Image (cartoon, rainbow, N blue to C red):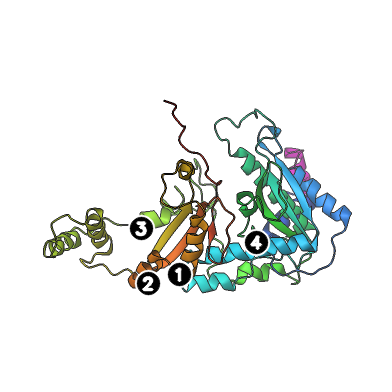
Amino acid sequence: MPDEQTTKRSNPNALPDAQRRGVYAAIYGRCDIRTFRPDPIPDDVLARILDAAHHAGSVGFMQPWDFLVIKSAETRTAVRALFERERQAAACLYDEPRRSDYLALKLEGIIEAPLNVCVACDPTRGGEVLGRNSVPETDVYSTCCAVQNLWLAARRGGRGRPGQHPQDGAPARDPRHPAPRHPRGLPLPRLCRCLPRTPDPRHGGLAAAPRARRGGGVRVVGATRRADLARPQAGACARPGGGTIAAIGPLDEAAQVAARARQDTLTKPPGSLGRLEEVAIRLAGITGRARPILNRKAIIVLAGDHGVVAEGVSAYPAAVTPQMVANFLHGGAAINVLARAAGARVVVVDVGVAALIAGTGLVARKGRPARATWPRVRR
């Protein structure tokens, strides 16, 4: 192992050993914090942490980030309510027992922490940015670098922050929500900045939660040299979900033949059920059973409005849409009856309802209320 003087001679830009150890200690000591003390964060400490975040690298030096410091208890209470709504909606996407595991996790410290920091990304910052032409998302990537700097600087000072909350981005989808909003920016993580309660925060929070385990080795895709990095399993990192996709085998042809033969014995004209018959045969091939048994079923209802209703050609006015969404959520619609008969759960997603709606279990993915219609043609 070369000593510090040897390292300095070979690379005059190298940090002293103590500083290098400090860098790695901050990296390996970084962790999500979920339980906090209410001790206030001095303004000079907060300013130093935010300054470290501001010194992150950014593509084309665009520096697209802004930081919204939230100390108001009233505002944080409103944000906490938004978090709870989104947490319940996210729980709808899991089957048991994962749903119960998810709901049992402590995922925020919005009220406990003395302040929150909302990190926003302004996509208009910098105009024509060098290096952004091919990958326009580099504004978000650059902002993530600022978040990482902020996290490491806070860890160095013994402060903690939880990871990204499930409600992040929801205020952008709902402009009437009381949570603070950037005039142009996309909200990224909302961070709670404070002192952790536990002496060693690495032993709490998500680190102790079921199914929360860090991978064992560095995964490399397309590396020209292995060096000392752990060799990844084939296909594990080629794309998101690569391991799952690689585990999917071919369809069971025998089961498909048996399913098609069974359909031919049913009292109905051949092919009269259209795509349903094709889906049933394909499910037989996927499960390997002529009569598939599906224990985890879900019906996803996507709710939204369109401007065509303004032409007077729709059977119902737009005011019916939020009423139907409420009915879906309360289990009173025809689709809920069909779902109960099939043993499936109903997931309701707001993808563009013109009205402001909320409800337990609603998944908010509103892009914008759709009001466009066909242009009127003058005769």
Q: Which residue is mark 4?
A: 82
**As displayed, is residue 370 above or below residue 180?**
above
Q: Is residue 5 magenta?
A: yes
Amino acid beneath label 2: Arg
Q: Which residue is mark 3?
A: 247
- Element type at mark 3: loop
Q: Is residue 319 magenta?
A: no
The location of residue 364, given as percent across then percent down, is 55, 56
Amino acid beneath label 4: Leu
Residue at 13% x, 58% y: name it. 269
Is label 2 in contact with label 3 (beta carbons under 8 Å)?
Answer: no
- Element type at mark 2: helix
The location of residue 237, given as percent across then percent down, is 46, 50
Is label 4 in contact with label 3 (beta carbons under 8 Å)?
Answer: no
Is label 3 in contact with label 1 (beta carbons under 8 Å)?
Answer: no
* Side (left or right) of 124 relative to 4: left
